[in-house]
């Protein structure tokens, strides 16, 4: 019979396997979701900074007004500029679960064009999307964590033992249009504002610092978030495969073999319709 001890070998027959005790960021729960965000959610495009475009001055955060001679608008360089973790609190309804409020800030460039398609001017713009999810992070404790890992000064950083939030995201442009007096049809009036539609792929996790003995079996792919609301139809975007390669680039063997590390096809054998570790993650759109 093999004998185990930290820092030594575990003996099993004639094979020797070295086990290590590590401090790891253990994911307690996670979910993924793709959202089709339209004007009804994002509102009109806002200026990302104080600037002047086509002779129009605008302050950061103000609604961007199209120039009078603009016949069309295009969007480029779309990205998630930052994700703000607004709040993280124990759920009042489910022990061990945490309600997480997130704010996604999208940055992009708008180019106004004349009737012939020529560029008139560009303006840096942004939109904001608020999202709420509920994930399992286990019960809260009164203990604290002290470490100098998170500082360059050598001093310790003290944090509570609540779970940490980890968010990955990618944005893609879907549609951009000028809005005339609240409708999307050009008439003799000037356009009032710019409406954009953005597709958001996101993964949200709750993790803790723990001691583990682990055996790697590849990337851990979260289950889909449970839908709790409806948006206007975006069938095309929602039918796309989730781009898992963006968040988990293929390892060397898969890369050289031309095999994607995207989400495996559903075999139909799963009986767990919920999100991550058999729990209902309750992602809200």
Image: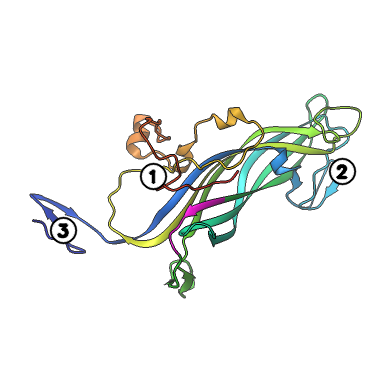
Span shown in magenta? 133-139
- Quadrant occupied by the N terminus: bottom left
Q: Nearer the viewer, residue 135 or 239?
A: 135
Residue drawn 83% across the image and 25% down it: 115
Is residue 283 left or right of 176 when viewed as pictured? left
In this rendering, the label closer to the viewer, 3 or 1: 1
Please give the label number shown on residue 220. 1
Q: Is residue 138 magenta?
A: yes
Asked whether disc 2 touches disc 1, contact meaning CB atoms under 8 Å apart, the reply is no
Alpha carbon separation for disc pair 3 and 1: 27 Å
Residue drawn 48% across the image and 40% down it: 224
Q: Is residue 1 magenta?
A: no
In this rendering, the label closer to the viewer, 2 or 3: 3
Q: Which residue is mark 2?
A: 55
Is residue 104 left or right of 206 when viewed as pictured? right
Alpha carbon separation for disc pair 2 and 3: 73 Å
Q: Quadrant of residue 245?
A: top left
SS at mark 3 in the image:
strand
- Residue 248, horizontal then vertical, whole percent: 43, 42
SS at mark 1 in the image:
loop
Is residue 128 left or right of 152 when viewed as pictured? right
Q: Which residue is mark 3?
A: 9
Residue neighbourhood size for the residue with mark 3, other residues' Cα within 10 Å, grouped as few (<14), some (14–19), many (≥20): some
Residue neighbourhood size for the residue with mark 2, other residues' Cα within 10 Å, grouped as few (<14), some (14–19), many (≥20): few
């Amino acid at each position: 019979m093999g004998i185990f001890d930290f820092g030594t070998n575990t003996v099993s027959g004639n094979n020797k396997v070295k086990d290590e005790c590590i401090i790891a960021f253990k994911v307690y729960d996670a979910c993924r979701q793709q959202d089709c965000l339209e004007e009804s959610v994002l509102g009109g495009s806002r200026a990302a900074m104080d600037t002047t475009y086509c002779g129009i001055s605008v302050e950061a955060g103000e609604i961007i007004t199209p120039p009078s001679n603009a016949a069309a608008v295009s969007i480029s360089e779309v990205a998630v500029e930052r994700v703000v973790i607004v709040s993280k609190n124990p759920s009042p309804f489910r022990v061990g679960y945490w309600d997480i409020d997130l704010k996604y800030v999208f940055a992009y460039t708008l180019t106004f064009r004349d009737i012939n398609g020529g560029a008139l001017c560009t303006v840096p713009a942004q939109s904001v999307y608020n999202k709420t999810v509920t994930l399992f992070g286990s019960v809260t404790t009164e203990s604290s964590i002290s470490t100098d890992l998170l500082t360059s000064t050598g001093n310790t950083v003290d944090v509570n033992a609540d779970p940490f939030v980890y968010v990955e995201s990618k944005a893609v442009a879907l549609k951009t249009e000028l809005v005339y007096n609240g409708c999307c049809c050009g008439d003799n009036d000037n356009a009032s504002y710019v409406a954009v539609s953005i597709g958001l792929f996101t993964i949200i996790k709750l993790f803790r610092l723990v001691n583990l003995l682990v055996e790697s079996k590849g990337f851990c792919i979260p289950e889909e978030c449970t839908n709790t609301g409806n948006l206007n139809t975006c069938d095309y975007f929602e039918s796309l495969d989730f781009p898992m390669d963006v968040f988990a680039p293929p390892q060397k063997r898969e890369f050289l073999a031309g095999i994607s590390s995207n989400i495996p096809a559903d075999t139909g054998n799963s009986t767990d319709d919920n999100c991550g570790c058999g729990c209902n993650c309750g992602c809200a759109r």
